[in-house]
Image (cartoon, helix red, strand yellow):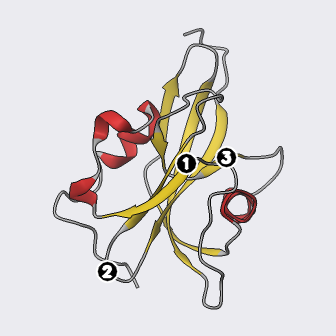
Amino acid sequence: MPASREPLPVVCALIMDETGRVLVARRPTHQHLGGFWEFPGGKVEPGEPTEAALVREIREELGCEVTPVRALARHRHDYGTVFIELIPYVAKLTPGSPPPKPTEHDEIKWLYVNDIKLEELAPADRLVAHELEPNGVKTPW
């Protein structure tokens, strides 16, 4: 990877419910990384704060409102055609938010961390999943 190549900033949300499950979404087959599961999110616009990007992307992709709770370690991944810096946040549904619905994904589901199959996640999301506790994540609120 050339030293001058800047990564594309991408946010993702580990949206957690009160039981400690996390929401994952399956990418449509016609898109890049189609069929892989991911933590939902998307590109950060130039000049946009990452937390604002997270809230916007989740609203666009899932039709719900989230509150970022805490940032996790950032990870860089080179997909060959795109080099990203994945910026993950633990988040929760904002009180009064409608439930998430897959508007840009084939499917969504809630899973306990130990039920997530790493080989089914997009490669950059695997880096985030490795940091999660194997017996489940306690909600941080």
- Amino acid carrying label 1: it is Ile
Query: Do labels 1 and 3 touch, CB within 8 Å?
Result: no
- Amino acid carrying label 2: it is Thr
Q: Residue at x 37, y 39 (%)?
A: 127
Q: Secondary structure at mark 1?
A: strand
Q: Nearer the viewer, mark 1 or mark 3?
A: 3
Q: Residues within 10 Å of mark 1 (few under 14, many from 20)?
A: many
On the rendered structure, is 46 left or right of 72? right
Q: Earlier in the sequence, mark 1 or mark 3?
A: 3
Q: Quadrant of the C terminus?
A: bottom left
On the rendered structure, is 93 left or right of 50? left
Q: Nearer the viewer, mark 2 or mark 3?
A: 2
Residue on which disc 1 sits: 87
Q: Nearer the viewer, mark 2 or mark 1?
A: 2
Residue on which disc 2 sits: 19
Q: Residues within 10 Å of mark 2 (few under 14, many from 20)?
A: few
- Looking at the image, which is closer to me, 58 or 140? 58
Q: Residue at x 68, y 49 (%)?
A: 104
Q: Earlier in the sequence, mark 2 or mark 1?
A: 2
Between the C-alphas of marks 1 and 3, the distance is 10 Å
| Residue 1 percent location from the top left of the image | 54, 10
Residue on which disc 3 sits: 42
